[in-house]
Amino acid sequence: MKAIVHHGPKGLDGVKYTDMKEPEPKAGEVKVRLKMAGLNHRDLLVPNRRNEDDPAVILGSDGAGVIEELGEGVTDVLVGDEVMINPGLRWREKSDAPPKEFEILGFPSHGTFAESVVVPAENVVKKPAQFSWEEAAVLPLSALTAYRALFTRAKVKKGDTVFIPGIGSGVATYMLQFARAAGARVIVTSRNDVKLEKAAKLGADVVVHTNSDWNQELANEKVDIVIESVGAATFNRSLKVLRPGGTIVTFGASAGDMIQINIREFFYGQYNLFGSTMGSQEEFEEMVKFVQNHNIKPVLDKVFPLSEALEAFHYMDEAEQFGKIAFKIKE
Amino acid sequence: MKAIVHHGPKGLDGVKYTDMKEPEPKAGEVKVRLKMAGLNHRDLLVPNRRNEDDPAVILGSDGAGVIEELGEGVTDVLVGDEVMINPGLRWREKSDAPPKEFEILGFPSHGTFAESVVVPAENVVKKPAQFSWEEAAVLPLSALTAYRALFTRAKVKKGDTVFIPGIGSGVATYMLQFARAAGARVIVTSRNDVKLEKAAKLGADVVVHTNSDWNQELANEKVDIVIESVGAATFNRSLKVLRPGGTIVTFGASAGDMIQINIREFFYGQYNLFGSTMGSQEEFEEMVKFVQNHNIKPVLDKVFPLSEALEAFHYMDEAEQFGKIAFKIKE
């Protein structure tokens, strides 16, 4: 079967469209014939973390398709079921942190950028009927990340003001949609006017251009929750717009890992900082229900054929997208 | 009346034992004839924050004594009542953060290092009969800070392991006592063997000398809560002993305000960081009940006559104490 794999040189130079063996489901697993896959920032990072002589791995965490074969002992699903895949393996209950055996589909185990994938049966969920295949494929990883960060961790509630610096990524657009659906007011920033326009259409209450002086423009805001995924570049500016006793939730650091905090300002402000990544099976199911109840549609930026995945990797690397990028695998 | 005031040169050079006018209670206030006062780190910081030409202010947040005079409309307390003072003014309910009008007794308003003090009637609480005057005087500020940080913020519970780097301060000794009383296991560090011995006697389950390699010595520990009041010097070492999903609560930065955090490690660890200072009236009352129910005795390091307060300031500045320092004002 055709697949996008990483093999050889570190980074995107080692990413290629090539042939791989069809996988076979073991006991407790299912084989899914994929129709669509979804691109995540993680797929760009994995090739940097691997060595030249590591065996080829199929990239990709997100995907949706039809169950083609059941491993021994699988009874909850049927061949022919239309499903999407929860890429969080072996994290079942909503808990403080994932268990040691937790991993994300798409390295070390083979992922979804292929004609088929094998996953534990518990990691497939019926595709909501309201979703197209594209939409189902781009939901799992980023919507789960957004859901846990916003609900389990930051405990957003009706009437809160939520601040999302740097709108555009898949997670950020889900955050915007989820926060609005929960009855919160949402403020976003971007250095890109087109993204700000799209964010406003998607429901953002206030949009701020990054070139302007946030802290002045937001001087009269009382922000309850800041969604911080940029890291070094924005962290302290984010702190300054937070109300006393407010919450920052962090799940990404696209602009640098090391941040400086004035810890005295932090404790005088009675602030809360929560780290979050992905989420459990339990949160995945809650998220899918939430999305259905509020009739939320994933924001789709662009669909590429799987054979052109590398082009999509570069496009995401330049942070040009607003929302999610999908790969078409099979009509 | 005699008092310890700050006036003139910044810092401890401007602190003197001198005469001040007896205060008079206004409507809603009470005048307390003080028997004992308690020293806090805040009393050392206030003189650094004032200017040469600011009017003289009586220092001191903590104190205990006898009500001598009632302002108009005060009905809840009687002349002759033996009380201790909650130095947190105008923060009533347990909330995310204090209201704007919150301040701490002992600057800008006159404090407790004097023969008498005037405070709002709601800020006096009956002295628990089990306490000596010394004990009542050294309880309020640090025990309230410890209580809010540990219970309201970090939500310590039975079976948790709590890590307190740098045992010795008043707040830290209350933390140790409160955490043990709540059924937690407590690990402490110090660079001072005598302090470690005292901490062990006070109930610490594990004591670690700061010169040793914590991270190795605590490699097999699963710490649920870190109490971080040192700041720059220990913050990242503290992070390393925390279990995934664990909590750091911070309320002090004696070794420097600016800290660096690797935010990627922070979110992969699903950590929580809570800033905390002081607490509300509601938490003060909960704290006093907790202390009574668990028969906790404040750890008293040394008692100085009020006239020798400056000597005590220098003694605390060198961090030599284990527990609290009191000033004797009246037999």
Image: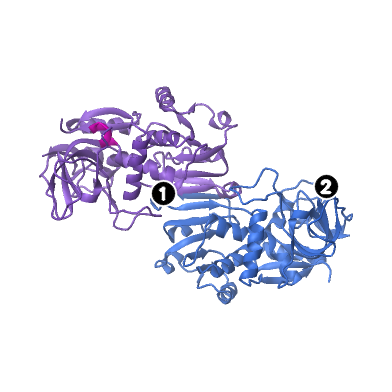
Chain colours: A blue, B purple
Q: Is residue B278 left or right of residue B214?
A: left
Can residue A229 be seen in this snapshot?
A: no
Magenta-drawn stretch contains B136:
yes
Marker disc for residue A55: 2
Residue A115 point in image, percent of width and height:
85, 62
Residue occupying the point 40% across, 22% down:
B194
Residue occupying the point 30% across, 41% down:
B140
Front-most of B210 and A284? Answer: A284
Task: Identify which amino acid the numbered label 2 is placed on.
Answer: Pro
Residue with the mark numbered 1: A267
Residue under mark 2: which chain is it in? Answer: A
Residue occupying the point 47% across, 59% down:
A237
Q: Which residues are magenta?
A: B131-138
Residue A81 point in image, percent of width and height:
81, 64
Q: Earlier in the sequence, mark 2 or mark 1?
A: 2
Residue occupying the point 18% across, 54% down:
B28
